Image: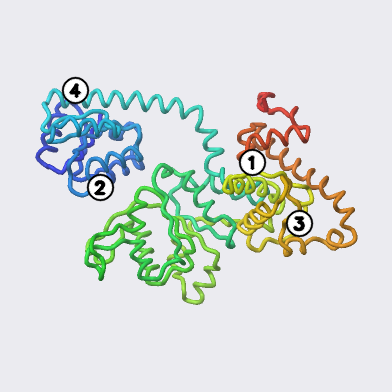
Amino acid sequence: MKRLCIIDDEPGHRLMVRAIMEDAGWDVVEAGSGEDGLRLLREELHAAEPGQRSGVVLLDMRMPGMDGRQTLHALQRLRPELPVVMLTAYGSVDVAVEAMKRGAFDFLTKPADNEELLATLEKAHEYGRLLAESAALARGSTDALAADLEPCRTLVGESPAMREVKELIARAGPSEATILILGESGTGKELIAEALHAASRRAAMPMIKINCAALPEQLLESELFGYKKGAFTGAVKDKPGRFVLADGGTLFLDEIGELPMAVQAKLLRALQERVIEPLGGVKPVPVDVRVLAATNKDLAQAIAEGTFREDLYFRLNILEITAPPLRERLEDVPLLASHLLDKLARKNRRAAPAVSGLFLDALRPYPWPGNVRELENVLERALILASTDMLQPAQLPPRVLEARSPAVSGAGAHMAAVISPALLEEAEREAIVKALDAHRGHRERTAQALGISRRTLQYKISRYGLAKRRDAADNDSLQ
């Protein structure tokens, strides 16, 4: 059955349109504001089968609160394939043109003629149906590739530890579960959260982030839950909190272990009941948010010390993902270095440098207490200090060089200079071979997994004599 969603603040007009469309055999749902309409359509998206969702929206241009323009913009993010017909009591050409430019399917003057209303909505529904069919056909050929690449594209590394993280993201991303991300500073917890959001059904909606350690308690509470006008001195108007801004999407709470106890209680209620109470408010506000949290603290110890609520911990920790420290995946250092140097070269507006085997060799023995963040800082320093297009150990800070073995830093340095590059090249070749095999020879996916450009991968394949390797399935995917 065709389904229409009316978003209009005038109950009498909604009733009239409902009568017309139900007489024509349509199913009709309605909302009295832009906010309520978005919530209704979002609930359809999560709960209903595609055939049971609204196929057309009839949207009033002039409404209090979120007006038609703002609602149209939000609808295009939520369901870009959904046709929207705009309504206004002001039949000016300028308003009509603006609505069409903003992506409206058509435009009607309020109150619309019954036959014109029905004909316009029928055309819009047919257009939406054809658009959905076309999108479904396109998705059929690209979904598998997108699912494989997109969520984890920023997570560089093919070590067993990183493969385990990527597999967890692939399994947990599409769920609605609250996930706790653990790991030392600089290990990439925020990147894991971004990958989880990208792998979810909420990927088209906002991902809002907040660092719980960066704000004092009073300010943190108002940032999370918002406040009403007059809630405190200086609150001259309502302000939505991060929960409301993330409605329909994902809220990432970094450094959750630093959350004050009073705020923990309000967060627990938000997770349990899916409602929040803004400061100075008397009415709970429903929210539809998936929460991801991260910490470098031992929360079990914090619970024992009475600084973290045990019930909140269990609510957050439905699934746990640990970001491995760099010292536990040193085999990823060459790939990370290549990826980070490409990024830093773009940042500093210069060509990506070549890297000597000795330079990479010097990076490996260092334990990297600051993890990937420290590696990035060290590489940026080297890039700035380099006087040639080839990075050498001389550009590394003393603490990194001093971590090398005595044979390298002492009298045996010359022999190490002869042997180490070959060993490192063999390690890099092995990593590329494993990645090619894991992705069945597909160069684009292999480059994404390794965190390097396709051009760099092509060069390394040629350098290491891997050009004749073939995809096991079609014997030709490297071409």
Residue nearest the observer in this picture, 143 or 216: 216
| Quarter of the image with the N terminus in it | top left
Residue nearest the observer in this picture, 37 or 363: 363
| Kind of residue at disc 2 | Glu
Q: Quadrant of residue 18?
A: top left
Q: Which mark is residue 452?
A: 1
What colour scheme governs how the chains and residues are painted in the rendered image of this protein? rainbow
Residue drawn where x is 49% and y is 64% of the image: 255
Q: Which is more foreground, mark 2 or mark 3?
A: 3
> Percent x, y for residue 87?
18, 34
Residue 162, compared with residue 2, is above or below; it is below
Specify few, some or many for label 4: CA neighbours under 10 Å numbering under 14, 14-19, or 20 or more.
few
| Kind of residue at disc 4 | Ala
**Which residue is the site of mark 4?**
119
Residue drawn where x is 27% and y is 43% of the image: 70
Residue drawn where x is 54% and y is 72% of the image: 301
> Percent x, y for residue 400?
73, 61
Q: CA distance from mark 2 to mark 1?
A: 43 Å
Instruction: Please say whether residue 428 is visible from this viewpoint.
Output: yes
Q: CA distance from mark 2 to mark 3?
A: 59 Å
Looking at marks 4 and 2 on the same chain, the residue that comes earlier in the sequence is marked by 2
**Which residue is the site of mark 3?**
394
Specify few, some or many for label 3: CA neighbours under 10 Å numbering under 14, 14-19, or 20 or more.
some
**Which residue is the site of mark 2?**
35
